[in-house]
Amino acid sequence: MSTVAERWREVRARVDQACERAGRAPSDVTIVAVSKLHPASAVLEAAAAGATDFGENYAQELVAKRGECPATLRWHYIGRLQRNKAKLVAGQVALVHAVDSVELAAELGKRAGTTTQPVLLAINAAGEETKGGITAETALDVARGIAGLANVRLDGLMTMPPPDDDPEASRPFFEALRQLRDRLVDTLGVALPVLSMGMSGDYEVAIACGATHVRIGTAIFGPRA
């Protein structure tokens, strides 16, 4: 079986190739290695191979893993976050990927102390009842609400298309997210540089559609227990 380091290098190469095909610089795309439910030793192996950004879905696991890893690593919170867990995340991560309400953003700002917590709006692009996130129709109102908060900065949008064996099935959702971001930029007059979209099965399509952050777990760390 391939090691974490080998899988990381393969993903890195494929991301670079996808960027080249899209006419983009590899530095434009951040690979968030999703390490949830994998041990800190796996994070350390990926970091030794060159990974710098890691994503966690559970606040307590994030706290524990950060304590076992070098302070130079950047952490991302990518799961649905309960407001009562915001204190474990705010000010501790480079980016919170899945904010779905002004209230959650306000709690993150309250808990961020003297820092500013960058966040993304989670867009439920397909309207799936099993997923969190807001609709494209309500995104403008929520973005305006977040813009008025202290210690929080809205940096962009994220989405997770319905699972499908065909990576191309994700393309309409990725393109819709980019178009929504562009409309919000025009309406609000603010920069929203981040598009977090694409996972192990469809990240190359996401890069072609403008992703700046791809969240890749299984392709780097292998199946979860």
Image (cartoon, rainbow, N blue to C red):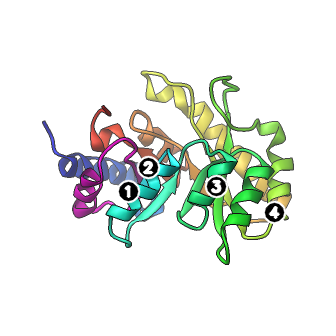
- In which quadrant will I find the N terminus? top left
Q: Which residue is drawn at 46% across and 57% down?
A: 63
**107 or 144: which is nearer to us?**
107
Q: What residue type is labelled 2?
A: Glu
Q: What residue type is labelled 3?
A: Ala
Q: Earlier in the sequence, mark 4 or mark 3?
A: 3
Q: Which of marks 4 and 1 is nearer the N terminus?
A: 1
> Label 1 crowding class (10 Å Cα cut-off): few <14, some 14-19, many 20+?
many
* Residue 218 seen from this side: yes
Q: Which amino acid does label 4 sit on?
A: Ala
Examine the structure image and report whether residue 41 is included in the region drawn in magenta.
yes
- Residue placed under numbered mark 2 in the picture: 61
Quarter of the rendering containing residue 175: top right
- Residue placed under numbered mark 4 in the picture: 147
Q: Earlier in the sequence, mark 2 or mark 4?
A: 2
> Are the residues at dot 3 and dot 2 in contact (C-beta closer than 8 Å)?
no
Examine the structure image and report whether residue 158 is included in the region drawn in magenta.
no
Image coordinates for residue 52, horizontal then vertical, percent:
36, 63
Quarter of the rendering containing residue 23: bottom left
**132 or 111: which is nearer to us?**
111
- In which quadrant will I find the C terminus? top left
- Residue placed under numbered mark 3 in the picture: 86
Q: Which of marks 3 and 2 is nearer the N terminus?
A: 2
> Are the residues at dot 2 and dot 1 in contact (C-beta closer than 8 Å)?
yes
Q: What residue type is labelled 1?
A: Lys
**143 or 15: which is nearer to us?**
143
